[in-house]
Image (spheres, coloured by chain):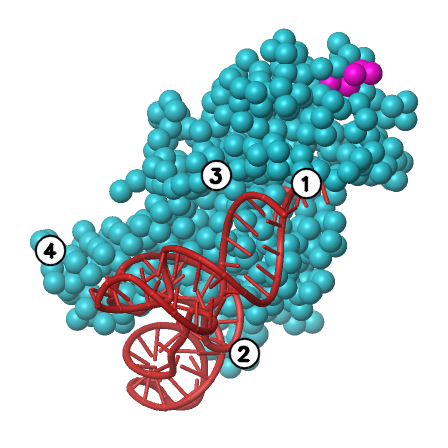
Chain colours: A cyan, B red
Amino acid sequence: MSLSLYNTLTRKKEEFQPVHPPQVGVYLCGPTVYSEAHLGNARGPVVFDVLTRYLRHLNYQVRYVRNVTDVGHLESDADTGEDKMEKAARAARIEPMQVAQHFVNRYRQHMLALGCLPPDIEPQASGHIIEQIQVVEEIMANGLAYEVNGSVYFDVPKYNENQRYGKLSNRSIEDQLAGTRANLEGQSEKRSPLDFALWKNASPEHIMRWPSPWGEGFPGWHLECSAMSRKYLGNLSDIHGGGLDLMFPHHECEIAQSQGSHSHTDEARFWVHNNMITVNGTKMSKSLGNFVLLGDMFKGPTGPLASGYSPMVVRFFLLQAHYRSPVDVSDDALQAARKGYRKLMNGLRLLEKLVPTADGAELSGDADLRKLTADIFTGLNDDLNTARSIASLFNLLRKFNTLATTPAALAEVSAAALTEAVDTYRTVVTTILGLVDEPRANAEQLLELTLSFYAEAKAEKAYDKVDLIRAALKGQGIVIKDTKAGVEWAYSEE
RNA sequence: GGUGACGUGACCGAGUGGCUAGGUAGAGGUCUGCAAAACCUCCUACGGCGGUUCGAAUCCGCCCGUCACCUCCA
């Protein structure tokens, strides 16, 4: 049984084999850090977090790169060509990198809360200008790019003579020409409307600018990922991912850049795309304004949501659907997810109680238990189908509950089978799916409750109880203080 | 116009040519001082119309509806 993944490049599920086993290089297109992250931005990181966790579980040596785009990306064709970062910076009257840093910090906080392990390398586009310029030079040396007024464009028709521009998104160059919106502004420098910028000349008001062989400017919109992927994962990485909306033009251009440079590869063997999150069936997006910010939804009601949802509930909610299916957000769906998540967590606590009573050889209950255990990996191996895997976990949990309450059933499973089942449940839930318990009980309130029992016992002169409570709290580093005003507590100073 | 998805029970959401998805909600039961949890049982679907097949929700065709990308977007 091995992992298969759907490869957008071939439009098929393929068995995963690393280019250079046991090393695996994974690249995820990260955020553009000029605004707060919303729920839609969280899906890719969560999916790729599970993917890299699972690859590690399979004993691969994973290098997981998730970049930060802090330069480039024009707001629209209509504006002055000003950078999104700069626009945000100008509005707040601060240094552009301050804007980037602020949102990088926020992003990391949110991803950590969602249980996403930090990537092994988190390169920033602004820190790799030299590498990007080098890629541009290589493409020019190969005759696939041209310079106009300090800007450099990728020559798509020329490239298409020997390669297929559109191989990832399955478009023909003719179709694209036919579908091109007529005479967009800012296109005049391009020889073909299909061409895209590798390097842009900086207009005078542009603050973010770097020297280059073509004058002061800034890198094109797709360049950083090609340059940084190559730097850290080599000419051909194993897996390159992002949202479905990045497939074209972003990833298509990346492939063209890699093929057109000295890499001469498709940049990655597997191209993996997660589907979108929708609200009432429509994609959640910045431009449509129908988004819910992660920071807001963790805290309380926001936008279409009548309640707040904790990061782990959100993570579980996302994983309960397959990553290539769209997921619709609603209170009903999130509330159902919340209950399901808590059920799964309660199961984690149940594991301690499952102590085998039988011993030795195979017993009558083993086959069933082993099947339930194996099912969990069937889902994961089939294109990282976490939805199926979670369903299998619930089936195993039902079994656990029966075993925990029915001694006769527990006597019918061997220690080996039970241990394997328990370990699998714990490993898959916590280590692979990354779902951990979020303590909800309020410690201070529990303490107050205990103190009220203490006071009660004291009033009844039940000193054995009083001593018991005092000792128990002492064990937690808490001392009780009987003052004239009543019972109080403090942290032990010992 | 081009490219690509999708339409599953009250809700969310998997999957497969014949064999229980799962979660949530609802009904009944076991247990229980009450309750909760847990377990058992029930409710039970695959947009419409044709076709292929011994058999299709699963394959094919048409129709209806929804969405995404083609412009920054995870």
First in sequence, mark 3 or 4: give its number: 3
Check the residue under mark 1 and report the chain it is in.
A
Q: Determine the secondary structure under disc 3.
A: loop
Q: Residue at x 88, y 40 (%)?
A: A91
Which chain is home to disc 3? A
Query: Of helix, strand and loop, which one carries label 1?
Result: helix
Quickly name the residue at label 4. Answer: A362
In the image shown, does B28 or A183 lie closer to the viewer? A183
Question: What distance separates the C-alpha of mark 3 from that of mark 1?
Answer: 22 Å
- Which three-letter amino acid code belongs to the residue tagged 2? Glu
Instruction: Give the magenta-colored segment's residue range.
Output: A148-152
Look at the magenta stretch and give its main secondary structure.
strand
Question: Residue B33, located in which quarter of the rendered image?
Answer: bottom left
Picture disc at residue A8: 3
Residue type, numbered disc 3: Thr
Q: Is residue B67 left or right of residue B34?
A: right
| Classed neighbour count for the residue bearing mark 4: other residues with Cα under 10 Å, few (<14), some (14–19), many (≥20) | some
Residue at mark 2: A456
Q: Does the stretch in magenta take in A151?
A: yes
Between marks 2 and 4, how big is the CA–CA gap? Answer: 53 Å
Placement of the N terminus of chain A among the 4 image quadrants: top left
Q: Secondary structure at mark 2?
A: helix
- First in residue order: circle 3 vs circle 2: 3
Q: Chain of mark 4?
A: A
Residue at the image point whose x is 54% and y is 78% from the top: A456
Look at the numbered discs 3 and 4 and tell me whether their residues touch, using CB distance below 8 Å: no
